[in-house]
Image (spheres, grey):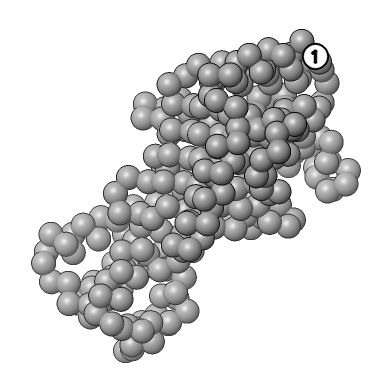
Amino acid sequence: MQLGWELRRLRKNVGFTRVQAVEGLNFSETKLYRVEEGQTALPKQSDLRDLLERYGITDESDVEFLVEIHRDSLNRGWWSAYRSTMPSGMAMYVGLEDGAKTIRSWQPDVVFGLLQTEAYMRAMFTTAKLVDEMTTEFIERSVELRMERKDVLTRENPAEIRVLMDEAALRRQVGSREIMLEQYEELARLAETGNVSIQVLPMGASVYRCSYDFAMLEFEGSLPTVIQMDIAEGGTSISDKDTTVWSFSRRFDALRDGALPVGETPKFLQQLSREI
């Protein structure tokens, strides 16, 4: 995606359309579109160099910078082993999540995925098993993938996680009472770490609410902010359009303003534990 963003920026700097950019080269306008959108890699380094020459990029340090990004783009991430269990768009999202510096998310229905316990995850998938015609192997692989994704919370340079959850998401029982108690304890533990903050939007508060979940991913370097939204059939939609980022930033800020302060989250979780 970083390579695609850089190539799109360079093309626009010289005022070329995609048709003009690929004229006489060994790949199509459609291929360039997919590369610029981060949907696929550019197969050959020679294709990259041909594009850069067309865009007037001759400084060797600039060329080598992009060649290095190209090399990295051809490497398969750890999540590629789970591609058969991931719905449309999910592989790209997991790759972006793995490289994110900051993740801000709103979740109105269930506990945010990166904060779920293994038992909570498994209960969610098992409940949907018959309806969605999942196999036991599919469920186990999906749980394994989600547990591996949680590494972004604890790695050497962990991502900064800012999660807003509706009270209903925490009260909605998934699995048994014991699973929910364990989940509340896990949330309380994570809330004490330096890189995770959790805020709850009370059901009784007459404030702005977004009816669907979304996440905002920010990165180091030149990559733009990315918005992720769940879509039908378990797929995921990703956008880095300025207007989309702006509108979802407004939504997140409004939700945050209506939520309880971060410092009240432990007390709220204790209350839920007592009630359940």
Q: From this viewpoint, is residue 61 visible?
A: yes
Q: Which residue is mark 1?
A: 275
In the rendered view, does 20 fall on the left or right side of 263? left
Q: Where does the C terminus fall, quadrant-wise?
A: top right
Residue 133: x %, y % from top left:
84, 48
Residue 211: x %, y % from top left:
71, 48
Q: Is residue 86 depicted above or below 149 in this figure?
A: below
Q: Which of 5/143 is in front?
A: 5
Q: Is residue 138 depicted above or below 69 in this figure?
A: above
Q: Quadrant of residue 66?
A: bottom left
Q: Which of 250/37 is in front?
A: 250
Q: Where does the N terminus fall, quadrant-wise?
A: bottom left
Farthest residue in the front direction? 206
* Amino acid of disc 1: Glu
Q: Is residue 18 depicted above or below 133 in this figure?
A: below
Residue 2: x %, y % from top left:
36, 57
Q: Quadrant of residue 180?
A: top right
Residue 64: x %, y % from top left:
18, 59
In the rendered view, does 125 fall on the left or right side of 45? right
In the rendered view, does 79 fall on the left or right side of 166? left
Residue shown at 25% from the left, 55% from the top: 68
Residue shown at 66% from the left, 18% from the top: 268
